[in-house]
Image (spheres, rainbow, N blue to C red):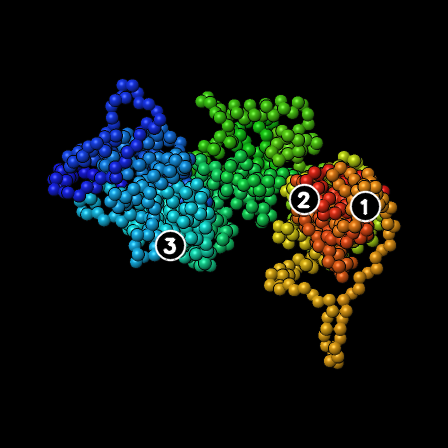
């Protein structure tokens, strides 16, 4: 709000002396202390507000009261409330990767400044009570009080204050009492309801006073109702004010702002954007306007209006003074071009971002810029450049852990998809899982891949090491000696040992990963700017410090520290060996044996030579290690990563190198399984024939001919059985993520032969629920291939066929007009003869032995006595009423309840096509779900259906264990009693009295 200048005071005096019109507020009389008594020393003293009705409001009195109220009270209170808002803005942290909040501050932050807001209320109240109520500032003071309550999140008090202003400042006619209607239509020519005041203010009023606050209070009341989530009342007020001819032009944008806020709070972002666009001029500062423009870009993007989103992102980038918003606005602007398919514009945006990265202004944000450019490169797609930019993001990242983790995750996923598993393992290990920005699903994926890749990398290292050692051993002696001396010289230099020292002098350990040593990094190299000195580059300095610390550790300022460190390291390692053989294979993978389980050897020529396989026995031992590692690696690809192509390549590599070591057909079995998974039936059949013809009677052959066969003694182990039953329960209860995690752990220990078709089927059903049809088909194919004798094979084949036609079926059902079929069909045959097709007749009912039912006895007085056998608790047996058949499912997730319902619906269509049996879902309690089959004429008809459905359940819902469901026959009235009382045992007692042993 505008403030008065001191030089205007004399002007006010002159004008007020010649002005006859008064702009004072209505005369309000009230008891400021309510029922409370004034302090004794002030009991006889009247406040200025209490003298309002006793004194004339002269020109001089008005001048004094206005100026004192304005500058001593309103001015200070208004400044305080503005300070509260500014502080709340400063404490607000925007995340530009998510939808921004509507305002650049939160009410939680304003409410935390309760002391300051209390001071505003105190100051405004004092300004009202200590001055004449006819001043021009009383309504403005009340508006400040209402705002203070609003910013304290005391919405009830705020709305009452705004309503008080609304009522008491409504225009009155002369001698009009308080019994008037606010908002009545006073114009006979207009049908519009008006609740706003007309503001006819002359130049003097515009210069010296603020507008009346009643209209402002109405807008603030709409905003308060919106925050109270009373959207109906807020919408009513907004609509009336929008059509109110008396609403002043100065408040049009304020009303648009509140309207946009109303839509935003209800997540109707497209409508919110339309109104916010009209309210942009309401932004207090240039940065606030840029922030709203960024929000407009986000909301238009969410609504699919990419051109408008791009325009507002561009405006935000130009106007903002926040470099982070500038970066994200340009990034999102580039995304809009991509969404429109304009790759050239995407490249232009990437070029602009790369230019930004070279400017000193954006030096601290290079990690964000390069990460964003990397993401854009993936969108093109350009994986090679994406990797470069993610590496640069990590290089320039000094203290932004969130973006460093994001970059590592992107690099890890790229390497994983490219099957560069050693790199992927390294990148996943670099991710800090404690970072709150990492999603829970990503954290689970990272952990799973880290565990799997660590085992894979260990096997790859073994293969690389043995291949390298064999290659060196096969060299000519002179060439081999030269290479060993070169390696020895390099490692001596790395560990600070002088060249003149004896070869057997000992020293720190070296690690054999392969025959190629890693090159030393130039600490002072610069890859960013030509000629840029190392110490002027913050990124290089940080990296140099980290590299030094990771390699040498913390160093004290002592002489000859390099040599002392090497000697100390060697001594510690020798002490750790405890005199054991450092080349013992049993220590290859134990902790302390070296990184990735690779052994450490002595820094000497003799130590290096001892590692080389020089004799045939040593070569055979090395080959055995490679063969074992290849098989382990292939199974890890097959079972842990489910990367069947990599597993096939590893198996085939094994066959090329070791064609005579077929492990009783296990290699062919692995190839058969992997080709089956990939759907290559020709190759799968080829290896299947090799196993069944060349390795009859072996475990591999039995696994193909009889998939349920296993020689594992753990199958009969009750602990193993219990573990898989627990996995089944997790699946069936809908805890799919936990079930899959437990499944992978169990399969890694016991293999996949224990994984029953029932578990595979419910896994597929869950995939279908999530519309992950590709995985569902893979699992269903497993049932068909591995369990051909299972009754679920036919269901799996049917489901695969349905999934292939899923889109067409859904479209058909969406457009389907359902009408009831006629019982008899009339049509013309080929020879134009009228044919009447009768509806199928009802199948003959199965003869059952009717229960012996005791008839109710009629007493002498005519009253009917119900036998005790027909009563159990609150339940009464009445066999002649309509009955239902109820299936009770215990701890079964909704998706499997629906699957059971669908299975029985199919069963009813096939076996009861001339009878309508409805199946409805209900619940007994939180754990027990009901499928209600209705309805049957009496108890006997329901029992007939009960016998058939109970027998059919074993095949219709074979994926459900028998202990997960049961059936009952019950009347509708007894079902309601059962649902309210939950006493199922009492009802079973009643049933067993009528049908002994059946239930």
Q: Give me the residue at 76% from left, 61% from top.
A: 914
Quickly name the residue at label 3.
Answer: 311
Quickly name the residue at label 2.
Answer: 923
Q: Position of residue 425 (x, y in %)?
A: 58, 41
Between 899 and 757, the one nearer to me in the picture: 899
Earlier sequence position, callout 2 versus callout 3: 3
Earlier sequence position, callout 1 versus callout 2: 1
Q: Quick check: can you spot residue 732?
A: no
Q: Give me the residue at 40% from left, 44% from top.
A: 102
Between 105 and 470, the one nearer to me in the picture: 105
Up/down of 576 relative to 302, above or below: above
Residue at disc 1, secondary structure:
loop
Residue reaching furthest front? 861
Earlier sequence position, callout 1 versus callout 3: 3
**Residues marked 1 and 3 touching at CB (< 8 Å):** no
**Residues marked 1 and 2 touching at CB (< 8 Å):** no
Quickly name the residue at label 1.
Answer: 709
Quadrant where the C terminus lies? Answer: top right
**Badge 3: few (under 14), some or many (20 or more) residues near its Cα, within 10 Å?**
some
């Amino acid at each position: 709000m505008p403030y008065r200048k001191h030089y205007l005071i004399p002007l006010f005096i002159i004008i007020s002396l010649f002005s006859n019109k008064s702009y004072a507020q209505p005369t309000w009389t009230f008891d400021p202390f309510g029922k409370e008594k004034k302090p004794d020393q002030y009991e006889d003293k009247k406040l200025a507000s209490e003298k309002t009705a006793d004194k004339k409001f002269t020109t001089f009195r008005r001048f004094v009261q206005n100026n004192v109220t304005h500058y001593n009270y309103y001015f200070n209170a208004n400044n305080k409330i503005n300070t509260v808002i500014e502080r709340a803005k400063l404490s607000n942290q925007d995340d530009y990767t998510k939808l921004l909040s509507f305002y650049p501050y939160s009410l939680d932050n304003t409410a935390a400044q309760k002391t300051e807001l209390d001071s505003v209320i105190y100051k405004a109240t004092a300004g009202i009570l200590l001055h004449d109520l006819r001043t021009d500032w009383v309504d403005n003071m009340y508006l400040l009080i209402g705002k203070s309550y609003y910013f304290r999140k005391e919405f009830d008090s705020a709305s009452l204050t705004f309503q008080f202003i609304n009522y008491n400042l409504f225009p009155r006619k002369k001698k009009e009492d308080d019994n008037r209607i606010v908002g009545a239509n006073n114009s006979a020519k207009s049908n519009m309801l008006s609740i706003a005041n007309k503001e006819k203010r002359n130049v003097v009023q515009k210069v010296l006073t603020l507008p009346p606050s009643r209209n402002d209070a109405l807008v603030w009341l709409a905003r308060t109702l919106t925050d109270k989530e009373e959207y109906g009342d807020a919408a009513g007020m907004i609509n009336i004010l929008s059509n109110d001819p008396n609403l002043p032009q100065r408040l049009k944008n304020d009303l648009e702002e509140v309207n946009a806020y109303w839509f935003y709070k209800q997540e109707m972002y497209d409508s919110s954007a339309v109104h916010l666009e009209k309210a942009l001029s309401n932004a207090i500062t240039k940065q606030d306007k840029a922030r709203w423009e960024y929000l407009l870009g986000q909301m238009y993007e969410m609504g699919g209006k990419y051109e408008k989103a791009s325009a507002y992102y561009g405006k935000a980038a130009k106007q903002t003074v926040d470099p982070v918003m500038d970066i994200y606005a340009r990034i999102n602007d580039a995304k809009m071009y991509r969404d429109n398919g304009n790759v050239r514009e995407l490249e232009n945006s990437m070029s602009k971002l790369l230019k930004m990265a070279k400017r000193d202004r954006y030096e601290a944000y290079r990690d964000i810029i390069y990460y964003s450019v990397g993401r854009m490169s993936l969108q093109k797609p350009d994986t090679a450049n994406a990797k470069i930019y993610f590496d640069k993001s990590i290089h320039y990242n000094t203290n932004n852990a969130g973006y460093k983790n994001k970059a590592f995750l992107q690099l890890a996923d790229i390497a994983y998809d490219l099957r560069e598993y050693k790199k992927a393992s390294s990148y996943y290990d670099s991710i800090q899982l404690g970072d709150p920005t990492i999603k829970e699903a990503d954290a689970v994926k990272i952990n799973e891949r880290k565990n799997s890749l660590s085992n894979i990398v260990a096997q790859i290292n073994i293969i690389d090491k043995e291949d390298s050692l064999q290659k060196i051993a096969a060299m000519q002696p002179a060439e081999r000696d030269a290479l060993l001396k070169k390696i020895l010289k390099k490692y001596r230099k790395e560990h600070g040992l002088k060249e003149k020292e004896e070869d057997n002098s000992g020293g720190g350990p070296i690690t054999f990963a392969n025959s190629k040593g890693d090159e030393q990094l130039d600490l002072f190299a610069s890859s960013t700017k030509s000629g840029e000195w190392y110490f002027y580059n913050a990124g290089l300095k940080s990296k140099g410090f980290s590299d030094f610390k990771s390699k040498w550790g913390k160093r004290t300022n002592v002489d000859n520290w390099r040599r002392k460190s090497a000697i100390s390291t060697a001594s510690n390692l020798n002490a750790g060996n405890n005199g054991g053989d450092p080349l013992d294979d049993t220590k290859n993978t134990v902790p302390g044996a070296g990184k990735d389980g690779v052994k450490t050897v002595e820094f000497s020529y003799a130590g290096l030579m001892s590692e080389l396989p020089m004799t045939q026995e040593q070569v055979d031992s090395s080959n055995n290690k490679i063969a074992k590692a290849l098989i382990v690696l292939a199974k890890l690809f097959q079972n842990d990563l489910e990367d069947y192509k990599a597993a096939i390549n590893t198996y085939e590599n094994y066959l090329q190198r070791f064609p005579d070591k077929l492990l009783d057909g296990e290699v062919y079995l692995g190839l058969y399984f992997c080709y089956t998974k990939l759907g290559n039936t020709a190759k799968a059949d080829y290896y299947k024939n090799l196993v069944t013809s060349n390795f009859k009677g072996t475990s591999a052959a039995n696994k193909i001919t009889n998939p349920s066969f296993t020689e594992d003694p753990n199958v009969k182990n009750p602990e193993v059985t219990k573990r898989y039953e627990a996995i089944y329960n997790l699946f069936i209860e809908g805890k799919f993520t936990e079930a899959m995690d437990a499944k992978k752990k169990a399969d890694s220990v016991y293999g996949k032969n224990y994984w029953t078709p029932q578990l595979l089927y419910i896994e597929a059903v869950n995939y279908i629920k999530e519309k992950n049809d590709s995985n569902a088909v893979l699992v269903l194919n497993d049932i068909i291939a591995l369990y051909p004798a299972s009754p679920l094979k036919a269901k799996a084949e049917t489901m695969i066929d349905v999934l292939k036609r899923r889109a067409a079926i859904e479209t058909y059902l969406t457009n389907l007009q359902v009408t009831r079929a006629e019982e008899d069909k009339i049509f013309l045959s080929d020879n134009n003869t009228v044919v009447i097709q009768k509806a199928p007749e009802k199948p003959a009912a199965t003869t059952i032995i009717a229960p012996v039912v005791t008839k109710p006895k009629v007493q002498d007085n005519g009253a009917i006595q119900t036998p005790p056998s027909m009563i159990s608790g609150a339940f009464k047996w009445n066999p002649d009423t309509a009955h239902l058949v109820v299936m009770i499912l215990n701890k079964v997730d909704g998706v499997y309840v629906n699957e059971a319902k669908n299975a029985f619906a199919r069963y009813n269509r096939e076996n009861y096509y001339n009878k309508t049996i409805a199946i409805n879902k209900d619940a007994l309690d939180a754990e027990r779900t009901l499928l209600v089959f209705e309805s049957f004429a009496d108890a006997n008809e329901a029992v007939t259906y009960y016998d058939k459905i109970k027998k059919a359940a074993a095949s219709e819902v074979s994926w459900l264990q028998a202990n997960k469901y049961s059936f009952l026959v019950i009347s509708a009235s007894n079902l309601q009693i059962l649902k309210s009382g939950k006493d199922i045992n009492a009802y079973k007692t009643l049933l067993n009295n009528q049908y002994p042993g059946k239930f």
